[in-house]
Image: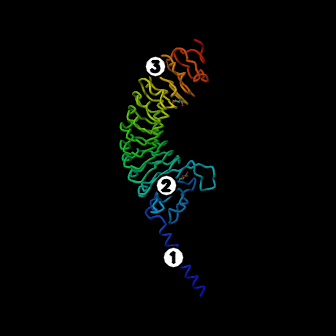
Amino acid sequence: MGGGCFIQLTTVAVLFLSLTSSVLSCPPSDRAALLAIKAALNDSYLGIFNTWTGADCCHNWYGVSCDQETRRVADINLRGESEKPISNNAHRTGYMTGYISPAICKLTRLSSVTISDWKGISGEIPRCISDLPFLRILDLVGNKISGTIPPEIGKLHRLTVLNVADNLISGKIPLSITNIKSLMHLDIRNNFISGPIPRSIGRLRMLSRALLSGNRLSGTIPASISRIYRLADLDLSRNQISGSIPKSIGKMAVLTTLSLDLNKISGQIPITLLSSGISDLNLSRNALEGNIPNAFGARSYFTALDLSYNNLKGPIPKSVSSASYIGHLDLSHNHLCGQIPIGSPFDHLEASSFVYNDCLCGKPLKTC
Ligand SMILES: *[C@@H]1O[C@H](CO)[C@@H](O)[C@H](O)[C@H]1NC(C)=O
Ligand SMILES: *[C@@H]1O[C@H](CO)[C@@H](O)[C@H](O)[C@H]1NC(C)=O
């Protein structure tokens, strides 16, 4: 009697378990898409994909997580640099070859895709990625991905992070990018992206970091950039940008880092730039001309101010001694002339800050 009851109970328990596990396991179509992604990548090094096995892709598949309610795959998070390997080689960093399968676009509830720092992943960004309506993070930094940024990327109206830095991407910045009103971090550094920065980039009102350095961008700096109220970090260095620096950039509310070095920027340094909130300003290796504006003041606080390798002339402005702080200063390789001002911002500077000018003199150079 007692035995029969036990058998009945176990039967019920087994039934219940099999029911819940089929409810909890991921949809077969999501599982199939993940297996197609796995098949297109070669991870013989860390063995991450050895965990992508069994029916329930929401359970213990490394780097995969699902929405609690829908059980649809919501996040793919595979980082080559930081992850501890599954295998016993504790200090190896990841290396993967292969490509990102367009099957990823069948995971229509994806919210984040991070497949970063695998060094060897090549191929293109699947164009259909712009059809993933819930995508908020696309992070493919540090691979060998080529091709272009998908032209319809602007359809991703929930996207907050777009990071494709350190790849082999070419083509232009798609105009549609300026439709992504939610975009906060744009990082396309160190690719082969050419053409202009879209004129209407100022529409990206949520943008706080725009890192575009180390590409082949040309044309001028769109003045609309200065309408991006939240922009704190603007890096356009190492491109082929020409024209002058829009005056309005010095009036931006929270801009703290402005890197325009190694471009073809000409014209004068806008007065506003020297007493703005910018604390890290690099204008080195351009074709800036005219005098350094005599516009330093108590608001001028520079951890680094690099104006080297330009065509600046005239004296170092007297007002520079009234700056709150200048940590690192480089005025070398210009055509400056006259006495180096004295005052606290200058006490710690060495000759290298001033060398290769026409006729600067005074401490730390030779006396006038
Ligand atoms: C996978 O990569 C390893 C080296 O990391 C290589 O030896 C192997 O041939 C590759 N396999 C395939 C199927 O490409
Ligand atoms: C400014 O940019 C130049 C050229 O890219 C670079 O060599 C220099 O180190 C930068 N200056 C600072 C202070 O980072």
On the image, numbered disc 1 is attached to which residue?
15
Q: CA distance from mark 1 to mark 3?
A: 83 Å
Q: Badge 3 local density, few (<14 within 10 Å), some, or many (20+)?
A: some
Q: Earlier in the sequence, mark 3 or mark 2?
A: 2
The label nearer to you, 2 versus 1, is 1
Q: Position of residue 191 (x, y in %)?
A: 46, 40
The label nearer to you, 3 versus 2, is 3
SS assignment at label 1: helix
The residue type indicated by label 3 comes to: Asn
Q: Badge 2 local density, few (<14 within 10 Å), some, or many (20+)?
A: many
Q: Position of residue 125 (x, y in %)?
A: 43, 48
The residue type indicated by label 2 comes to: Ile
Mark seen at residue 132: none
Q: Residue at x 37, y 42 (%)?
A: 178
Q: Earlier in the sequence, mark 2 or mark 1?
A: 1
The yes-or-no answer for disc 1 within 8 Å of ligand 1 is no
Residue projecting furthest to the front? 298
Residue projecting furthest to the bottom? 1
Rendered view: 264 above or below 29 = above
Q: Earlier in the sequence, mark 1 or mark 3?
A: 1
On the image, numbered disc 3 is attached to which residue?
291
Q: Is residue 357 left or right of residue 87?
A: left
Q: Position of residue 42 (x, y in %)?
A: 52, 54
Look at the image and name its color scheme.
rainbow
Q: Is residue 143 left or right of residue 108?
A: right
Q: CA distance from mark 2 to mark 1?
A: 32 Å
The yes-or-no answer for disc 3 within 8 Å of ligand 2 is no
The residue type indicated by label 1 comes to: Leu
Asked where in the image residue 170 lies, by quadrant, the reply is top left
Mark seen at residue 76: 2
Q: Position of residue 153 (x, y in %)?
A: 38, 47
SS assignment at label 2: strand
